[in-house]
Amino acid sequence: MTDTHFPPPINGSAANGRADDWRIDRERARAGGAGTIPSEALEIVDETASTNTDLMARMKALPRERVAPGVHAVRAAYRQTAGRGRQGRSWQASPGNALTFSLACVLPRPLAGLAGLSLATGVAVVDSLARLMPGEAARLALKWPNDVLLDGRKLAGILIETAWSTASASAVVIGVGINVRRDEALEAELEAAAAGAPAQARATPPAALSQALPSANLTDTLAVALKALTEMIERFGTHGFAPFVDRWNACHAYANREVVLIDKGVELARGIATGVDGSGQLLLSTDAGMQAIATGDVSLRLVDDAS
């Protein structure tokens, strides 16, 4: 752990007399569901450049032919100085308001067998958050390929990187960022930046878990997320994406709505988003027929929001 020590977030529960509530209680997190991860594998640090980068380096150093499948490490950080999402975007968050962590695992599947992993991860994140707020679960949705939405706004993002792969196994790092508490200053900054950008280039505005669950905190969120992710990894390792297709489609934010696919500001395709197939491809009903769009560095927007 670094020597950096952060003050509690302005909007955190310190205002209610609990100055340490914004930090992760490691033992409570393990007791609440993260106990499926070996104690020594769960790391919580104040600051690092990127938890994904940290664990990618570690996984690349493993002996590929002798490594066991399963979860090898989880690394959470209150601040990432070079945190990133898809398409090289930076992940912006202030300590105590967002849960940012990465999970390194080995799946008994070759590279081609990882299709749909980011979508299965999205299902696991949605289901974990639904456990925290069952009465508000209907407000959660999935945006292809790897965003979790709350009331149509971005609640969580996922970044998956492959460290290596063989004919029988792949080492993967799954990065997750969840906005747990509102950061009004950061929201205002992002909204100001979006106001000056073309409609097609604007990112989905943020949401925070506390908007649906006022008692939301990093400890409980980490506990349920890790429990769901370890269950997903075991199931995906055996069956691939197939067991997650129906659940993903049930949570599809843009189901049967007109969408546009954008790459660097250029429209690639538009049509009705009907769902995803067994390999995680987006099924798009267009004037030219049904198209299956593979996961890539493209942005998906509702037509109304992109014009």
Image: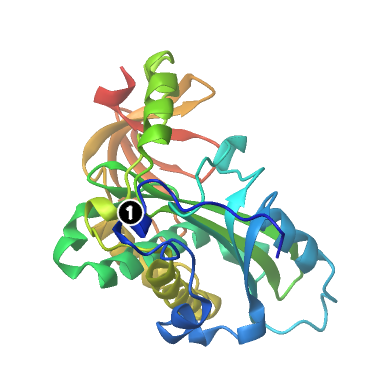
| The C terminus sits in image quarter | top left
Q: Position of residue 236 (x, y in %)?
A: 50, 74
Q: Is residue 267 above or below residue 146?
A: above
The front one of 177 and 10 is 10
Q: Give the residue at x 40% y 82%.
A: 32
| The N terminus sits in image quarter | bottom right
The front one of 207 and 122 is 207
Residue that label 1 marks: 15
**Which residue sits furthest left?**
135
> Image quarter for residue 106?
bottom right
SS at circle 1: helix
Q: Judge from the rendering whether residue 139 lies leftward or rightward of residue 185; answer left or right.
A: left
Q: Is residue 62 above or below residue 291?
A: below
Q: Is residue 116 above or below residue 69?
A: above
> Image quarter for residue 119?
bottom left
Q: Is residue 282 above or below residue 165?
A: above
Q: Position of residue 95 (x, y in %)?
A: 51, 51
Q: Give the residue at x 38% y 56%.
A: 277
Q: Position of residue 75 (x, y in %)?
A: 62, 66
Q: Position of residue 59 (x, y in %)?
A: 76, 68
* Residue 300 seen in this snapshot: no
> Image quarter for residue 140?
bottom left
| Label 1 neighbour load within 10 Å: few <14, some 14-19, many 20+ | few
Q: Judge from the rendering whether residue 51 lies leftward or rightward of residue 292; answer left or right.
A: right
* Residue 217 seen in this snapshot: yes
Q: Amino acid at mark 1?
A: Ala
Coloration of the structure image: rainbow
Q: Report the number of numbered marks.
A: 1
